[in-house]
Image (cartoon, rainbow, N blue to C red):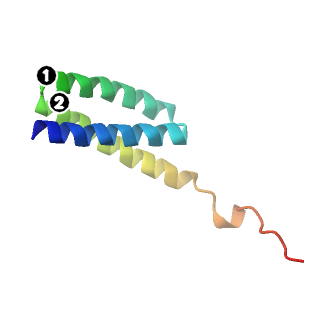
Amino acid sequence: MFYIQAEQTRTLLEDVGRAACRLGDFDALQSVQALAASYIHAVETTDLQELKHVEAFLKTLKQRLLDFQATCKVPVAVSLPQPRSA
């Protein structure tokens, strides 16, 4: 059970890290780095509680990144004009 949870958390860590990098959110990247260290420690010591804490922080960070991404979307009215047909 522990290692299944650990793999799910590792996948979430990877996804959140990619999203933070793609969005250029350097604060989130620093958070992911710290959470990665905590994740490694949790796996090395098979500490389920620490693993659950890492997962909870990652879910919160993922939601923050999704909210940030939603605010960065370019409105349709501001999008590039379509080429005119001749």
Near-viewer residue (26 or 12): 12
Badge 2 local density, few (<14 within 10 Å), some, or many (20+)?
A: some
Left or right: residue 69 versus residue 12 is: right
Q: Percent x, y for residue 61? A: 36, 41
Residue at mark 2:
50
Residue at mark 1:
45
Task: Say which label, 2 or 1, has the lower sequence index.
Answer: 1
Q: Looking at the image, which residue sits at the far right?
A: 86
Q: Look at the image and tell me in which quarter the C terminus lies.
A: bottom right
Q: Quadrant of residue 15?
A: top left
Amino acid residing under circle 1: Thr
CA distance for labels 2 and 1: 9 Å
Left or right: residue 34 versus residue 66 is: left
Left or right: residue 48 versus residue 77 is: left
Q: Looking at the image, which residue sits at the far left?
A: 1
Left or right: residue 73 versus residue 77 is: left
* Residue at the image point whose x is 44% and y is 45% from the top: 65
Q: Percent x, y for residue 72? A: 57, 51
Q: Percent x, y for residue 81? A: 78, 66
* Residue at the image point whose x is 13% and y is 33% from the top: 49
Circles 2 and 1, Cβ within 8 Å, touching? The answer is yes
* Residue at the image point whose x is 30% and y is 23% from the top: 37
Near-viewer residue (84 or 68): 84
* Image depth: mark 2 or mark 1 in front: 1
Q: Secondary structure at mark 1?
A: helix
